[in-house]
Image (cartoon, helix red, strand yellow):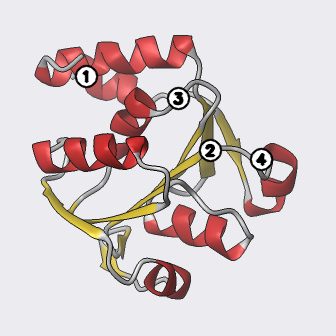
Amino acid sequence: MRLRKELRKTYGKIIQTSELGRSLRKNDTLFAVGDIVVGTLLDNGFLPKISIFDCRTERGRIVVPSIKSKFSKPIVVRNRPGTISRSLWFAIKRAAARHQRVGIRVYGEEDLASLACIHFAPLGAVVMYGIRGRGMNLIRVDGHIKDVVDGFLLQMCGVR
């Protein structure tokens, strides 16, 4: 219960679409989680290194044209809500090590994928995910946020 409360805290800066140009640099290494966030970044000229999506938003089916056109053959994984499956974990790990851009299509839910992204992202990278009704959370990865996330992962599943 305490971990769930901690995971709901905002780590980073909430931004709107209109703030993308001021908040991101063209050379930022981006990790994007969620269909709306991925679509918004693509539609505004930002190409994430890793884009994670489940073709759902607020429990409804969604097709984002820019995702469909950019990632016609994404890596496909399964992931239950409130978890980080082994297949999702290793897909993010492998994608972070590659030199090309990767789309990861999740069957299930991608709600905690941002934790794995922060864990595998290099220092200085940006991880973005949506916060319902508020905007996009932009986290610039540094040693502190990596320590926080690694603490969560250790509590959740003994991963570090």
Instruction: Give the secondary structure at mark 2.
Output: loop
Instruction: Give the secondary structure at mark 3.
Output: loop
Q: Is residue 102 visible?
A: yes
Distance Cα–Cα, label 2 vs label 3: 8 Å
Residue 8: percent from left, percent from top: 41, 33
Of labels 2 and 1, the one closer to you: 2
The numbered disc on residue 29 is 2
Q: Is residue 107 visible?
A: no
Q: Earlier in the sequence, mark 4 or mark 1?
A: 4
Residue contact between numbered discs 2 and 3, judged by CB atoms under 8 Å: yes
Rendered position, 21 above or below 127 = below
Of labels 1 and 3, the one closer to you: 3
Residue 153: percent from left, percent from top: 25, 22
Q: Earlier in the sequence, mark 1 or mark 3?
A: 3
Camera-nearest residue between 97 and 8: 97
The residue that appears at 18% across and 20% down in the rendered structure is: 159
Distance Cα–Cα, label 4 vs label 1: 27 Å
Q: Quadrant of residue 48?
A: bottom right
Distance Cα–Cα, label 1 vs label 3: 17 Å
Task: Using a 10 Å C-alpha cutoff, classify the residue at mark 4 as few (fewer than 14 neighbours), some (14 to 19) or many (20 or more).
Answer: some
- Residue 104 horizontal side relative to residue 137, left or right: left
For label 3, the residue is 122
For label 4, the residue is 24
Q: Amino acid at mark 4?
A: Leu
Q: Amino acid at mark 1?
A: Leu
Q: Amino acid at mark 3?
A: Pro
Rendered position, 112 above or below 67 = above
For label 1, the residue is 153
Distance Cα–Cα, label 4 vs label 2: 10 Å
Camera-nearest residue between 47 and 33: 47
